[in-house]
Image (cartoon, rainbow, N blue to C red):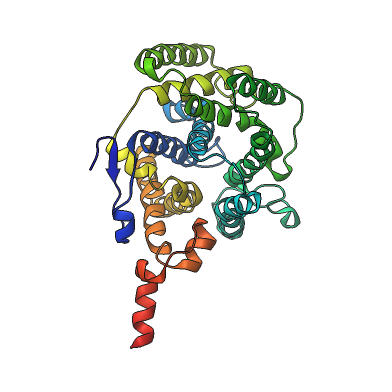
Amino acid sequence: MAAGEVRYFSINKEVDAMQRDIHIDTLRGMACVFLVAYHVVGTGATNGLGIDSGIYRELSDLLAYVRMPLFTFLSGVVYAYRPFREGFINFLQGKSRRLLIPMIVVGTIFAILKSLTPGANGDIANWFTLHIIPVAHYWFLSAQFLIFMVMVPLEKMGAFDRAGGFFVVLSGAILLYFSGIDTEYFSISGAIYLFPFFLFGMGVTRFKWGLAQAKVLSAVLCLVAVGAFTALHISGDVRGAGRTDMGLLLGAVSCLALYYSSLRINSLAIIGGYSYSIYLFHVFFTAATRILLYQLGVEDTNVVFVISMVMGIAGPIVVEMVLGGFNLLRLLFLGQSRKEPETLWGERLIARSVRQ
């Protein structure tokens, strides 16, 4: 196996053989850990662990400046490897399959279970606007879809053929970021919030900026990020992530620092290889684990946090291994394309049962 690559193990031999960029998957794994921890901790005293102060609360609030910007930055990096050139219908179908189908299927199941489960923290306000007003963290999927659709006319116009055009688009995205446009419908506000980070990821990859000085850039950016985070912590104003000047600065600096760091950690990279499934399914496992532990009388915050984290990461990996073996299920729940039945363990099992 070549340097910089890691092998991912699953029930499917084809996935076993898949080799990926360990650095990018390390960062994906890191983003997954940050996200799962956020949903384990919750947003305050009324959900998650039900804490409104302490180290878990402070770290969760600080990491709000990194979580979703990092996911989006990496999406821009990956997009730059294979940007839109032609064939809009195929592009639209691919992004709809990958993003919108799992958003609707998994998001709807999540909404139903959340409304039926005691202690699941919340209910759906209006079922008629389900997915028009995004469900929980699934807003990210529709926001990503909107970003990809915006990229199509920009690519057709050649907006990114030169660095100058890129900076014009980036400037426009930043102006939108600070604009007063704010609507929850179809994740439009979410797309406006994330678009600059997507462009940062695409830009550094497409134009290969700073790669020769990557280590120096990473060190400098890390110092800037640590200084800014420290200032936020001292000021006590750590819940300002979102479309703020500090949100944009810290999100961009943190993403760039991590990108230039060339960080490679196998355990995080393996988690990162299942990042999409973890994003889709982790809340089912974190909520169920927390509720079960409380019912069993386990109330120690540290114990509940650790077990919930493990289940929130391991559970979705198992889900992908199982659902990925069936063409229909991999489409509906994972947004994955159809594969030849003989390459999927589940399809082979069904065929064997039919023959018998």
**Residue 190, can we see it?**
no
Can residue 75 be seen from the camera position used here?
A: yes
Q: Residue furthest left?
A: 1
Which of the pair 80/108 is nearer the observer?
Answer: 80
Q: Position of residue 190 (x, y in %)?
A: 65, 36
Q: Position of residue 64 (x, y in %)?
A: 52, 29
145 displayed left or right of 125? left
Q: Position of residue 173 (x, y in %)?
A: 67, 26
Query: Nearest the camera: 334 or 79?
Result: 79
Is 232 rendered above or below residue 124?
above
Q: Residue at x 29, y 60 (%)?
A: 13
Q: Nearer the viewer, residue 205 or 195?
A: 205
Q: Is residue 228 above or below residue 336?
A: above
- x then y, percent, for residue 143: 63, 41
Compared with residue 317, is residue 36 higher up or lower down, i.e. above or below? above
**Which quarter of the figure has residue 322?**
bottom left
